[in-house]
Image (tube, helix red, strand yellow):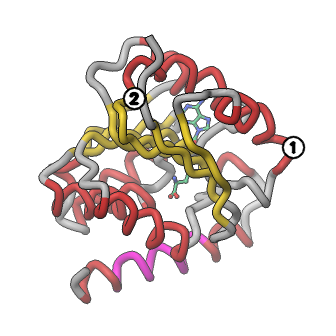
């Protein structure tokens, strides 16, 4: 990663922490992924040559920039879904500043509705929005998840009750290997080994 992009990510990290510390309205918090978790996931995604990447929960684009940086190296693309128009506008601006805007499709709306009709297949999915909706979103996306795909979710150790339903679904899937990585706020990492008929 070049120094300019590193500096932008560092700036956004500081902005997110300071904004969230001073903000009582949860809907206005950025709730960005921890940098060590983002870095770890980006190594896995680069190693897996991920090209069809989906993110649920864009916020202001901090993690989206990491995935777009991966996509730049794998000749891939990122689709990222966000329900807040204000946050999506911030992500749009931040991706432009990162010179990575052309790698990303930003979709606005409720992710559960959007994934019902989303086109394509995915070799990387990062769940980072409403943890209660994630199990349904995962079930809807199953036919579109390729063998060899990485399926990740954040906040396993920070919000164990909220993410329990998602973990129940992923643990019950025989065609995925799954473990929790103690990085950042706890990352659920699943790997699709085959597709059930
Ligand atoms: C934890 S933040 C995402 C942080 C971002 N991935 C990052 O690391 O910079 C969760 C985001 O999901 C959005 N969100 C919540 N429920 C959603 C839904 N049903 N559909 C789409 N976005 C949703 C919120 O507005 C919020 O911006």
Marks 2 and 1 sit apart, C-alpha to C-alpha, by 26 Å
The reply to whether the magenta stretch includes residue 13 is yes
The reply to whether the magenta stretch includes residue 148 is no
Which residue in the structure is indicated by mark 2?
145
Does 126 sit left or right of 9 as displayed? right
Q: Would you place residue 182 above or below residue 88 in this image?
A: below
Q: In which quarter of the image is the N terminus?
A: bottom left
Q: Residue at x 47, y 26 (%)?
A: 109
Foreground tag (2 vs 1): 2
Ligand 1 shows up in which quadrant of the image?
top right
Which residue in the structure is indicated by mark 1?
161
Point out residue 47 in the picture as x, y percentages from the top left corner. Answer: 30, 63
2 and 1 marks in contact (CB < 8 Å): no
Does 32 sit left or right of 75 as displayed? right
Point out residue 4 in the picture as x, y percentages from the top left corner. Answer: 24, 84
* In the image, farthest residue toward the bottom: 3
The span picked out in magenta is: 7-16
Q: Is mark 2 within 8 Å of ligand 1?
A: no
Q: Does the residue labelled 1 lie within 8 Å of ligand 1?
A: no
């Amino acid at each position: 990663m070049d120094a300019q992009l590193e500096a932008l990510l560092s700036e956004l990290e500081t902005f997110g922490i300071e904004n969230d510390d001073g903000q009582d309205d949860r809907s206005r918090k950025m709730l960005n992924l921890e940098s060590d978790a983002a870095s770890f996931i980006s190594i896995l995604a680069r190693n897996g040559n991920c090209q069809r990447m989906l993110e649920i929960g864009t916020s202001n684009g901090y993690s989206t920039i990491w995935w777009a940086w991966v996509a730049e190296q794998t000749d891939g693309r990122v689709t990222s879904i966000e329900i807040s128009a204000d946050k999506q506008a911030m992500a749009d601006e931040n991706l432009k500043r990162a010179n990575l805007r052309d790698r990303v499709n930003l979709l606005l709306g409720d992710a559960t509705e959007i994934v019902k009709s989303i086109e394509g297949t995915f070799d990387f999915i990062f769940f980072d929005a409403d943890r209660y909706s994630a199990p349904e979103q995962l079930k809807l996306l199953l036919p579109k998840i390729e063998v060899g795909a990485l399926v990740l979710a954040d906040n396993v150790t920070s919000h164990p009750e909220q993410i329990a339903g998602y973990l129940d679904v992923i643990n019950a899937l025989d065609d995925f290997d799954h473990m929790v990585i103690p990085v950042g706020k706890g990352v659920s990492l699943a790997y699709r080994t085959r597709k059930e008929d």
